[in-house]
Amino acid sequence: MNLRRQVGQFLKRHGVKTIVDSHTHIYKNSQKRAKKRKTITMTYGRFPAERLLNIEKKLCAGFGVKTRRVSFGLPNYAIDHREHNRYVLAESKKNSTITPLALITLETSQNSIQRLVRLGFKGFKPYPEFSSKKVTSIFDYVSPNLIRIANKTSKPIILHISHDIPSSRIVQEINKLSSLMPNSRIVLAHMGETFLNRSIRHELYQGIKNLRNVFVSTSMCGEPALFELAVMTLGPSRIMYGSDAPFYLSHSTLIQYDKKEMHNTTQPHGRDFVEVTREKFSWTDQNIRNKILAEERAKIPRILDWQVQGLYDALKKLYMQKKINSKQIRQILGGNAMRVFR
Ligand SMILES: [Zn+2]
């Protein structure tokens, strides 16, 4: 049976009525940067809300589910982050199924952040790329202003962990951030971060398991073992579906270093795999990419298919083992995000 039919039956069996995608980017007019930096925005120079909604509609046709999404712009040097915010907010006013998050820089003032909440933003998205500092810590891009107002207004943030933070400090920094904003919530994108190897993620989940206001989202991940690990360590109420649209339209795969005899101990964070994409994303090693593409091009799946397959496999297995129930499956696919981004 194909994945589509399996997923359809799975959603029906567990009474899933709404799927909430907790991590989507919508934006227009990124062409300028696309010319300058031949990376992601070359492929996805524009990704207006209509396009995302159409893709979701097509994907979920026949499943009898409604879709909602948490949306924000992109870190982008050519387009002012405020322009992204205006676009996302305007789209959320036209369509109440879009939950808007505001991009925040190190310089955004307390008044501006408070104003964004009054305007209707439901949370915040700081980015290491926005920092004017040399980033070696979460606090180089999550400002005291943001922490204070997020806590005061009880609005969540989605957090990326920068590559430049030593892995030995990640747990400690998230603990500190969590304690500084007890009324707010923190969602770690990409199940912690795609570049962290398995043993570091193991340590990360252990290190945050008592932080009740810290969650992980499945965006850009498709490894069933990782989802199972997070569910078993953090519990099903702290993991939520997220896709990272539009990048999920790319074709990408993870290749184990050891499998390819390319184990590289100089990689930061002891990365134990290499992400290979058909598109020339800035974070992929071009030499390795070219070598693998030559061998495996035909086998490289669309990220979305890999994500859905991985999450489906993990949830099905956990359900069969009676480690989660239908209600918890509904929470992972939507309920948790609704609760966090309120
Ligand atoms: Zn993203």
Image: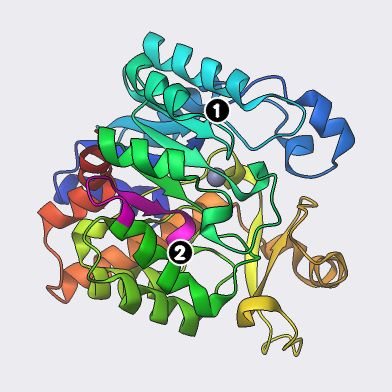
- Please state the horizontal and vertical placement of residue 228, each as a whole percent of the image: 31, 72
Q: Quadrant of residue 271?
A: bottom right
- Residue at the image position 79 percent from the left and 71 percent from the top: 292
Quarter of the image holding residue 290?
bottom right
Q: Secondary structure at mark 2?
A: helix
Q: Is mark 2 within 8 Å of ligand 1?
A: no
Distance between mark 2 and mark 1 Cα atoms: 22 Å
Q: Is residue 73 above or below residue 89?
A: below
> What's the residue at 75%, 69% (across, down)?
296
Which tag, 2 or 1, sits closer to the chain's start?
A: 1
Q: Residue at x 43, y 23 (%)?
A: 111
Please give the range of residues in magenta: 180-191
Q: Residue at x 52, y 42 (%)?
A: 126
Q: Quadrant of ligand 1?
A: top right
Q: Which mark is residue 192?
A: 2
Q: Quadrant of the N terminus?
A: bottom left
Q: Amino acid at mark 2?
A: Gly
The residue sitting at the top extreme is 94
State the mark number for residue 26: 1
Would residue 170 be counted in the magenta stretch? no
The correct choice, above or below, for 135 with respect to 125 in the image is below
Which quarter of the figure is the C terminus placed in? top left
